[in-house]
Amino acid sequence: MTTLDQAKVSESRPNPPKSLITKLNMGTGMIVGIVFAEVMYFWGKSMWDRQEAVMENRILTLSMFAWCIGFLIGIGAFIGPFRWLIGKDLTDEEQLFLAGKGQGVSRYFRYCTDHKVVGIQYLVGVMVMLGAGGTMAMMIRTNLITPGSKWVNAEIYNSLVGLHGITMIVAMIIVSTGPFGNFILPIMIGARDMAFPRLNALSWWLLFTAIPVLCSAWFFGGIPTGWTAYAPLSVQAGGGMNAFIVTIIIFAISSAIAGANITTTVVAMRAKGMKWNRVPIFVIGATMSVALAIPAFPSFMASQMMAGFDRTIGTHFYDAEFGGSGWLYAHLFWIMGHPEVYVILIPGVAILMEIAPVFARSPLFSYTTAVVGFAGIVGLSVLVWAHHMYISGWMPSLNGPFMVTTEMISIPTGLLFLVLLGTIWRGRPWMKLPMLGVYALIWNFLIGGITGIYLSDVPADDYLHGSMFVTAHFHYTLMGAALTGAIAGLAYWFPKMTGRMLDERSGYISFWMVQIGFQVLFLGMFAAGSQGQPRRVADYEQVFATSDLISTIGAYLVGIGMIVLLYSVIHSWRKGKIAPMNPWGAKTLEWTVPYPIYLENFHEAPVVTSDPYGYGRSEK
Amino acid sequence: MSDQHEVTDLAPTPGERLRNAMKARDVKITIVFGVIITAVFVVIGLWFYPKFMPEIMSENMKRGKDVIVYFTVISAPIAGLVIAVALYTLLDRHHGENPPEEAASFRTHTPIVFAWTVISALFCITAIVWGLTEMNVNSEDATENAKSALVVEVTGSQWVWTFNYPELGVQSEQLNLPLDRPVEFRVHSVDVNHSFWPVQLGVKVDANDRVTTLAHTTPDVLGTIDIKCAELCGLYHAYMETQGKVMKEADFNSWVTAQGGHAA
C-alpha cells in the first residue's frame, strides 16, 4: 500500500537492536497461543473426566484463557514487565523499535506502542467486527422475511441473535474511542503519545485475542441466550457460552486499560495553555465515555465470572434451586448495561459536535452546555439500571423512582440537541460527508430519544417491554446516533489517518442508502413491536408479516449501503486523492501536523492560546 | 445574513428582544416549519401507534396506549422545533471544495439556554407525573380488586404455559377468563426465566424459578387473547405461545364445569 510506504520515507531506518523483541509479531503470538491452548486442553482432558458438562466447560474456559495468555507472551507483551522483575528496562533502541520506527507495514502486526499504529489497528478491527455483526444481522432479517420461512433453524437463529448482539456491542463500544481516541485524541491535545504506550498496545492486543474466542462460540454450540446472557438460561447453555464469558472478561480488562490510559493522557498530557475550557469537545466526550466505562465494566466482568463459576466449578450464584437468584445476574448486568449505552453514544455525539462548527463555520454553541449535558448524562446513567427490570417482578415499588431518574436523562440529552442546533443555526452548512452525519443524528436521535421516553414509562413498558419496539428504539440510538457519529468521524479524520480523502461519490451513495434503509428497517420494526411481536423470535404469526417484510427490505438497503462504504474506504485508502494538511479548514491541533505524521507527532511542542472554535466573522 | 438578525443587544427589555427576534425572517420561517412538523407528529401520534396496536381488552392496555399517544402529542412541538431548525439551515447549503464564508459568531446565548432547559424540565416533569399517576391508578385498581379477584396460577416451562385455577380446581393450557371480573396472575417458572405476556390485556411479568410474581388486570372486552413469552428462554422461545378467551360469566362457568372443575 502506497500510503504506508510514505511513512518510511520520512523516518530514517535505524539498525534494529539485536533483541528478542525484533523476532516477535502476530504470527509468533498465534503460534504460542495455539500451543498454550492445546497443552491446556489435553492436560485438562487428562485431569478431568470430560463426560460431565461442568468438566467440559472447565476445560474449554481454561483453554481459551490459555490462548490469550499464550498469544500475549508470543507477541512480546510481557517482555517489559519481565525486565522490570529482574531490575532492568528496555533499552532505548528497543523502545524505538517498539514504537515502530522505520518498520513500514510490519509494525501493524507487532506489539507496537505508537498510538497512531494502535488507532489504525482498532479501526481495522472495528470494521471487521461491524462486518461480521452486520452479516449476521442480514441473516437474521432474511430468516424473518416471511412467517414460517425456516431459512435457518431455531437453534442457529438464536445463536445468530446472541452473536450479532455481543459482536455489535463490543464493536460499538470501541468504534469511536478506539480508532479516533487513540489516533486523533493525543494529537488533538498536543501530546507526543499516550500516557502509557505499552498499555495502549496491550489494550488492543488483548481485544484482538478475544475475537477468535468469540468466533469459536459458533463451533461450540453458539450463544443461544441473546447478548444479555440472562441466567439461569446461560448456566444451562452449551459450550459456546464459555466463549462469551471469556470474551467479556478479556474485553472488560482491555477496556479498563484503555479507559485508564485515555483518561490519564487527557488529564496529564495536554499541551501548554490547553486549559479545561480549551479542550476540544470530542476529547471531553471521549474521556467522559471511557471514564464512565471504568466503573461500569467490572460489574459485567463480575457477572460473567460468577456465571463462569456456576458453569465450571458448580457454584450456584444464579440457581434458585440452591438459593441463588437470577435477579442478581440481571442487576449486575444492567448496572453495566445502562451506563454502557452512554459509553457508546457520547463519543458519537461528541464527534459530531467537533464536526458541526467546522462545516457551519460558526463556534460551538455554548461549550459549557455541552459539557454539562455530557456530565449530566454520565451522572444519571448510573442510577437508572433497573428500568430494564420493571416487569421482572423484582421490586415493583421501586419502579417509580427508577422511572423518575430515567426520564430525567431527557434534560441533559436535550442540552446536546441545543448545542448542535445552536451551532448550525445561522451558518451555511458545507454539505460534505461529515456534515451529513450531523443532520442524520438530529433526526435519528430525536426518534430514539422520544421512543425512549415511552419505554421509560411503566404503564407503556408493561406492554412494550421485550417487544420489537425496544429493539427498534435502541437501534435508533446506538446505530442511528452513535454509528452515524463514528462514520462521520471516519470521513472527517480519514485524511489525517491515511493521508487521502475519502471518496465522496461512493460516500454519498452509501450515506443515503444506509440512512433511508435504516428508517424503513426500524419504522417497520416499531410497527411490529406495537402490534405485539416479541423480540428475538425465530418465527412469527401472519399478523406481523407486512411489518417484518418492510423491515427486511430496509435491512438489505442498509447492508448494500455498508458494502458501498467498505468499498469506498478500501478504494480511497489505496488510491484516493492525496489530502492536503487541513482539507476542512479546521482549527484543532491535529490539522497542524502534516501527513505522514512524525513519530512523536510534533517537532515542536504546540502552545494553545484559545479554544479551537474561533470561527465566525468577528469575535465578541 | 446581516447583523440585524443578531438577537443579543437589540433591545433593553426581554419582551422587546423577544418580539424583535420573532420579526427576523429566519425565525419566522423556522416557526412556520415547526408548526407544520408539529402537526405531522400530532397526527402520527394520534393515528400511527393506535392503528398498529391489537385490540384493547383492559384498562391497563388502554392506559399504556394513552401514555404513548399523549407523550407523542406533548413531544410533537419539541420535535417540530428541532427538525424545523435543522431544516431551515438546510435551505442555504454550500457545496464545493472550499469552506463557506464565516457565519455569525455567537458563542452562547444565556436566555435561550435557560429557556431550553426550563422547557425540557417542564416536559420531563409532565412525563414523570403522568407516568406515576397512571402507574398508581394501575396499582390502586389491583389493591382494590385483590379480594374479589379470580386467581390464576401461571406456570412457564420450556416451552409451554399452563394455567391453574386453584379456586375452581381446573388446570388448562388455555387461558379463559370471565368478562369484567378482576384477575390476579401468580406467575412462576420451573426452569429458566420466561415472561408472561397476555398481549391484549396490556400486562406483563417475568416468570422466575421458585419466586411468584404478580400481575393484575380486569378483562373488559369479549374476545381472543394471545399469550406469548417476552423473554428469550431457549430453543423454542418463538413458539411458546397459546391463546385464551375472555367469555361471558355463564360461558366461563360451563367451560369450568366441562373441565371437571366446580364453578364458583
Image: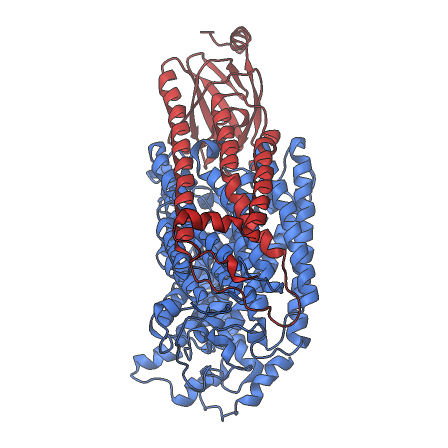
Chain colours: A blue, B red
Figure check: A318 above or below A299? above
Quadrant including the C terminus of chain B: top left
Q: Position of residue A341 (x, y in %)?
A: 46, 52
Residue A262 shows in this picture: yes
The front one of A223 and B231 is B231
Q: Position of residue A469 (x, y in %)?
A: 55, 39
Q: Is residue A33 left or right of residue A82?
A: right
The front one of A119 and A601 is A601
The front one of A402 and B133 is B133
The front one of A333 and A279 is A279
Q: Position of residue A410 (x, y in %)?
A: 43, 46
Q: Position of residue A193 (x, y in %)?
A: 42, 78
Q: Is residue A556 left or right of residue B75?
A: right
Report the residue at 66% width, 31% height from top: A543
Q: Is residue A49 left or right of residue B1?
A: left
- The residue sitting at the bottom extreme is A15
Report the residue at 51% width, 10% height from top: B256
Quadrant including the N terminus of chain B: bottom right
Count of numbered badges drawn on the protein? 0
Figure check: B159 above or below A512? above
Residue A336 shows in this picture: no
Figure check: B67 above or below A481? above
Report the residue at 49% width, 80% height from top: A24
Q: Quadrant of residue B210?
A: top left
